[in-house]
DNA sequence: ACCCAGGCATTGG
DNA sequence: CCAATGCATGGG
């Protein structure tokens, strides 16, 4: 089985925590210690290996997708140096989360629909509804499903999505996005500001959704979803001195992490989920 | 029976 | 420009 090398330190289990944290994800399915995803109609299985990740189907078609799924383009060494030089809290987090490499959403349409799904509701609820969308409009291949394509959802009626648990509004947003002429793949070449402006011209895509698209799909180093509730709570836990920070305060902190806001956000969120905010001051050598 | 959860558009000042 | 409102599900 081919091994895809990943720069050390790398912790596959830790890096894929997100795919298990909020319930199963039919499009990125965790089964028996391995991650399954459908790429170009075929199921690919990713499992931990020595010095990297074992991939059962590694060819020119699957490799870029796998690389994004594993967050290969993040420069963790540079981030680690930055943390050590500039920020004690971050330095400690990098140490505690050694080997954590944030996964990317490999597909732009999937990334946006996933964000729409998660607007306002808990991630648990979002995953439940999203799985019903995948089961209804995606295609099974092996154990996992391919995420519904824009072509497939463009032909759907909002009512059909509402029947799956989406609000009427969200059902309209998703079908509208699927029918939108905006070239999502082309956004790869646009600046952060242009990506945000283009996405926000689509009904249902606001600043929060655009920020997560920059962060989780395009891996833009400076993406910083300051309006995100989870990030606000995480930033508050690590930097708020016992107080809950406002969105504006979180936004203002971006300068402190420049140009590594994206990785910082991922480390703070994951660090918070794993409870590493509980002992910031408590450890006695 | 509430209330909250990784927003957003819409409406009305 | 800002404030108030409705939205649907899952979990507490």
Image (cartoon, coloured by chain):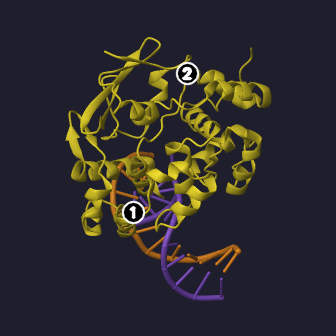
Chain colours: A yellow, B purple, C orange
Q: Residue at x 46, y 65 (%)?
A: A204
Q: Nearer the viewer, residue A260 or A67?
A: A67
Residue plotted at (48% across, 34% down): A103
Taking A213 as reference, is A97 above or below it? Answer: above
Other residues around mark 2 within 10 Å, as few (<14) / some (14–19) / many (≥20): some
Name the residue: 63% across, 40% down: A221
Q: x, y percentage for residue A3?
A: 39, 16
User: What residue is rendered at 74% in x and 17% in y?
Assistant: A284
Residue at the right extreme?
A86
Answer yes or no: is residue A281 visible: no
Q: CA distance from mark 1 to mark 2?
A: 36 Å
Q: Please state the horizontal and vertical placement of residue A199, each as a whole percent of the image.
A: 51, 61
In the rendered image, is residue A117 in sight? Answer: yes
Badge 1 marks a residue whose secondary structure is helix
The residue nearer to you, when weighing A188 against A5, is A188
Looking at the image, is A202 positioned above or below residue A138? below
Q: Furthest residue to the top? A: A50
Q: Residues within 10 Å of mark 1 (few under 14, many from 20)?
A: many
- The nearer-to-camera label among 1 and 2 is 1
**Where is residue A194 drawn, in percent x and y?**
60, 58
Residue with the mark numbered 2:
A99
Chain for disc number 2: A
Q: A33 and A146: which one is in front?
A: A146
Say which chain tag 1 marks: A
Q: Is residue A226 above or below residue A171?
A: above
Give the image location of residue A6, x and y in percent: 49, 20
**Residue for badge 1:** A177
Counting residues from the start of the chain, the first of labels 1 and 2 encountered is 2
Helix, strand or loop at label 2? It is loop
Left or right: A49 as drawn, with respect to A80: left
State the residue in front, A185 or A155: A185
């Amino acid at each position: 089985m081919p091994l895809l090398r990943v720069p050390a330190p790398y912790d596959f289990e830790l890096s894929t925590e997100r795919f298990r944290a909020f319930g199963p994800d039919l499009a990125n399915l965790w089964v028996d210690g391995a991650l399954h995803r459908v790429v170009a109609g075929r199921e690919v299985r990713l499992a931990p290996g020595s010095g990297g990740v074992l991939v059962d189907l590694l060819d020119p078609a699957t490799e870029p997708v796998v690389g994004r799924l594993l967050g290969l383009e993040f420069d963790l060494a540079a981030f680690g140096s930055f943390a050590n030089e500039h920020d004690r809290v971050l330095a400690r987090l990098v140490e505690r989360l050694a080997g954590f490499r944030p996964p990317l959403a490999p597909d732009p349409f999937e990334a946006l629909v996933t964000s729409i799904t998660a607007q306002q509701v808990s991630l648990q609820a979002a995953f439940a509804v999203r799985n019903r969308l995948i089961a209804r409009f995606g295609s099974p291949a092996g154990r996992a499903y391919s995420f519904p394509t824009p072509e497939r959802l463009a032909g759907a009626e909002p009512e059909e999505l509402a029947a799956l648990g989406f609000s009427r509004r969200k059902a309209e947003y998703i079908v509208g996005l699927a029918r939108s002429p905006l070239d999502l793949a082309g956004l790869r070449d646009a600046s952060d500001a242009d990506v945000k402006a283009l996405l926000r011209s689509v009904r249902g895509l606001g600043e929060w959704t655009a920020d997560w698209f920059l962060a989780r799909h395009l891996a833009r180093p400076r993406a910083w979803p300051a309006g995100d509730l989870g990030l606000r709570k995480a930033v508050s836990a690590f930097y708020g001195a016992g107080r809950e920070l406002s969105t504006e305060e979180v936004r203002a902190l971006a300068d402190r992490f420049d140009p590594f806001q994206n990785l910082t956000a991922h480390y703070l969120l994951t660090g918070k989920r794993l409870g590493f905010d509980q002992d910031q001051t408590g450890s006695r050598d």
